[in-house]
Amino acid sequence: MSESPLRAVPRGLVGAEDGSPVFKLDRDPFLENGLPDPLERRLDALERRAPVRLRPVRSEPKSRPGPRRRVLPPRPSATPTLSEIELSDEIGLLDRLLPERARRALASIAHLVEGESPYDRFGFSPGVARRAMPVFHALYKYYFRVESHGHEHLPERGRAVLAANHAGLLPFDGAMSVVDILLHTDPPRLARAIVDRWAGELPFVNVFYARVGQVIGTRENFADLLDDDQLVLVFPEGVDGIRKTISHRYRLQNFRVGFVEQALRAGAPIIPMAVVGSDDQTPILYDVKPLARALGLPAAPITPTFPWFGPLGLLPYPVRYKIAYGEPLPFHERFGPEGAEDARLVHYLARQVRRAVQQLVDRNRA
């Protein structure tokens, strides 16, 4: 390491070998040369500066405004039981196609629309449901020949979330589930199925869904339905469920977790539900995903009948359905509304619901 050209000397200011000045360490070089001390200049400048006015610090933190609650319409009145319904003596052609129990159930759920409006605030129309019911009832009884059990797990009143597996391209599993719940509850209950948002953009289809009681899947709609103490039917697999290939039949895909958050916040139990048969109604041999993305569709399937027979190839096969309802999972009693803020807990509970639904599916396939 080379030596510095400035060296300490026993006396004052002297010259270095190269002619540059050196300083003695125990002397002030600024005073020796008559130079102003920069430290003193800095202190003088600070003294001349105007004092800084400091804002007082609040002893308590400013409270944040609470979340704004939406003003909701009054809840629908209590649903009358089947025995409380008085049917009209005039029976139309559509009424003749339905058994008396189905007609009583339709008359009972008309309470969801109050006042003179033909729709409730979600778009449900008892008149449209009455005209559509003969078609869905015929599919339920004669085409899919639905068998079901576990109805004792469906609450007579109050909010609940039904979580089911999903398959079959077209949502006949959802339609058959709604019909089954309507026909096997007293007072009759209309399950409000949560529909994927992409379906809400389809012309005519979105309006029909709303008129028969189904609701587009937004957080606001979900919360409002539970606030009304209604049954909410969800398919947590989403579009991944309906496009499963034949090699993945009855193997549940990953669950979305939003329904768990909503159930915890609303204090609603989650009821696992299995639909056996929907995976066989339209067996998908292959899903052309690049074509689906190009067309903006959830799937571009190749089945034994599609695209060879055109749109008719998407119609479901007349397979037998079996619907089963499991014991409610009261997560809300253990974790409360604050559990919805814990992301790890929500994902864990969603996996528990998926496991319960998978076990229910496996037991009813045997």
Image (cartoon, rainbow, N blue to C red):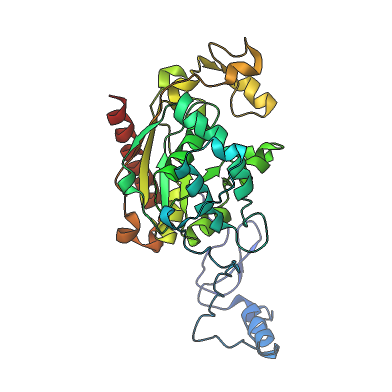
Please indicate whether residue 232 sits to the left or right of residue 345 in the image. right
The percent coordinates of residue 73 (x first, y second) are 60, 66
Res. 32 visible in picture: no
The percent coordinates of residue 322 (x first, y second) are 37, 30
Q: Is residue 255 above or below residue 259?
A: above
Residue depicted at x 61% and y 75%: 29
Res. 254 visible in picture: yes
Please indicate whether residue 216 sits to the left or right of residue 105 in the image. right
Corner quadrant of residue 209:
top right
Corner quadrant of residue 273:
top left
Corner quadrant of residue 110:
bottom right
Q: Observer-nearest residue: 241 or 184?
A: 184
In which quadrant is the C terminus drawn?
top left
Q: Is residue 365 above or below residue 82?
A: above
The percent coordinates of residue 143 (x first, y second) are 48, 24
The percent coordinates of residue 306 (x first, y second) are 59, 14
Q: Observer-nearest residue: 24 or 168?
A: 168
Across the whole image, how many numbered discs are drawn on residues?
A: 0
Q: Observer-nearest residue: 49 or 128?
A: 128
Please indicate whether residue 295 sits to the left or right of residue 95 in the image. right
Q: Is residue 212 above or below residue 165?
A: below
Residue depicted at x 29% and y 59%: 334
